[in-house]
Amino acid sequence: MSDLTASELNMVFNTPHGGTVHALKDVSFTLKQGELLAVLGPSGCGKTTLLNIIAGFQHPTGGSLHLGDHEITAPGVDRGMVFQQGALFEWLTVADNVNFGLRMKKADPAETSRKVEEWLEIVGLQGFGRTPTYQLSGGMQQRVALARCLINDPDLILMDEPLGALDALTREKMQSLVLKIWKETGKTIMIITHSVEEALLLGERLFVMAPRPGRIHKEYHLPFADLGLTNDPREIKISPEFVETREEILTMIWNMEEEIMGKTETV
């Protein structure tokens, strides 16, 4: 089992003027294999820093991080990353973007071609393999980014605001696709988002993080991701339980933002 285990993670950055910023403080959690975790919070709460540490892009100043028995100290093939902007090679075709990792590993071309077609079908891009990537819409490019990540079969998929740049309708369709991929592949997924609605719909587990220093303020275990596999997301979003939880979290984050801005509420 490739569980992700974080133990008392700390991250302190030095500022140009000799000060320090405590981006993360004593963050501990275990993400079980096959779970879908959404993380949100106000700006400056350390959610992107946390994701970058898990990806191996940054090294924590304290604590430890393991995926299964392996300590994370650098990027690795056991973790796949999907960014807000697809970070694709736009001059290449869709197929050449999707199979990039396998080509770098010199995988068998015939097997690679079969896997590309399989994943293009899963993400709804069958027939687009020879299309130059720059000709695709933003939503279609994010589908390419998902396929490129998943074809390498990582244990853990990390998503940094992957749907943030999309229009509302495309974003909703992509949310359903993420849930479909999660359930069909059994992959462990961690997604960073600024959207409370998105976090509630996608997060089987949900962390609301507090800033200065960044830490897990509250954890939720939610039913909406499973419901989203068989029910209309719009119906889920207007259900009383969803609306109540959304308002609770929005108020929580609003109060954090007020505290950050140094404001006090008067009655």
Image (cartoon, grey):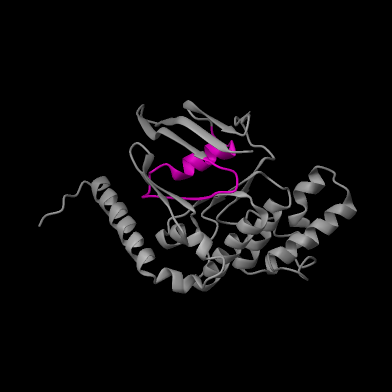
Image: 106 above or below 59: below
Please indicate, yes or no, whether residue 93 appears anywhere in the rendered image: no
Q: Residue at x 39, y 72 (%)?
A: 238
- Residue 15 in the image: x percent, y percent? 39, 32
Q: Is residue 146 left or right of residue 117?
A: left
Q: Is residue 49 left or right of residue 86?
A: left
* 32 magenta-colored: yes
Q: Residue at x 58, y 61 (%)?
A: 179
- Residue 245 in the image: x percent, y percent? 35, 60
From this viewpoint, which residue is outermost toward the left?
Answer: 267
- Residue 112 in the image: x percent, y percent? 83, 53
Q: Nearer the viewer, residue 261 or 175?
A: 175
**Image quadrant containing the C terminus:** bottom left
Q: Residue at x 42, y 62 (%)?
A: 197
* 10 magenta-colored: no
- Residue 36 in the image: x percent, y percent? 54, 51
Q: Which residues are magenta?
A: 31-58
Q: Is residue 267 left or right of residue 234?
A: left
Q: Is residue 46 left or right of residue 84?
A: left
